Amino acid sequence: MARGWLALLMAGVMVQAQGASSQIGLGGFQLGQYLRTADATYKLPRLERTQEDGWLVKAFTASLVPEVNIVFQCPPGDPRQIVSIQVAGDPASGFSLVSGLRLGMDEKAVVAILGRPKERKAYQDEGVDYLRLDFENRNYSCEFDGKGRLISFMLFGYTGFPEQPSDMPSLSGLKAALKAGELSAFWEILAPDFEIYLGRDLISYQKAAALELKENGRLKDVLLGPGGLKEALERKDANEDFQMRFSEEKGQVKGYSVCKFPNSPLLKEIVFTFLAGKWRIYKIAFREQTSPGK
């Protein structure tokens, strides 16, 4: 798999040692988002390359002064979907990462947040000294420059998240987010590749998830506006009928939990998928005649 893009760029949930749990998001994006959302957010890539093993690597400039780059990796089997996000750049930027972590921090401050590393490895790349920290049962790693400053943080895959659910989904988390009345409350509710069906219209993330949950007015209307999801679930006819649905994907059988609303004139069904340790909403289907926010 493609790794070690730091030199190129600089030149051109379980608890471990009280550290941060595995992460689904970095730089405003979530693992599992489609790569097209990065293209739409940043427009022109700084670097794009397909490795010999088929991994696609695509990098963009997130900040020019000080310089910070964000790198995405997609596997050979699905070059559309992001499975790795890396932020690397000038330590003077103080670029915000996860859990209070920022570029430029020293190793002591990083370990205080992330916990004791499983492996601490010093190495050289083109004559430049680096230090890499890897963490037990976590999906992240980080790197420091020769002055001991954090210059890279990477998420890769879903290591550290529960692989199987311990219970079935409910609508309680969704209803709490709807009651909060802010799109930001849906960061952990919506799957990175969610889809909302409104007749022939389809709503999904078009840019970085954090941007969409801040400025996508259409998404806000559909979730919180008149005739939207909030109103549909508050109605007395929103009787829930949970079922299981199975489909074959990439040669494997995947299970989804489906909540149907047989009596609702607004809402048809909500489909949950288990991703990154929790049930998240993969699909919301409204009745064809429904026009939320209008």
Image: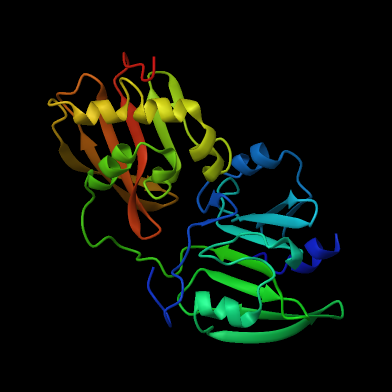
Q: What's the residue at 41%, 25% (across, down)?
A: 221
Image quadrant of residue 289? top left
Q: Horizontal and vertical percent for residue 202?
A: 45, 26
Q: Residue 128 falls in which quadrant of the image?
A: bottom right
The residue located at (52%, 79%) in the rendering is 112
**Vertical placement of residue 243 versus 285, above or below:** below
Whether residue 52 is visible, yes or no, is: no
Instruction: Give the quadrant of the N terminus.
Output: bottom right
In percent of width and height, residue 248 lies at 36, 46
Residue at figure coordinates x 43%, y 83% from the top left: 17
Residue 99, can we see it? Answer: yes
- Is 134 positioned to the left or the right of 217 in the image? right
Residue 269: % across, % down: 26, 32
Judging depth in this view, the residue of 283 and 189 nearest the camera is: 189
Q: Residue 41 in the image: state x and y as whole percent.
A: 65, 40
Q: Quadrant of the C terminus?
A: top left
Tell me the residue at 36%/30% (across/down).
Answer: 223
Task: Compare residues 106 and 145 and report the one nearer the observer.
Answer: 106
Answer above or below: position of 125 versus 1. Answer: below
Q: Is residue 266 left or right of residue 251?
A: left
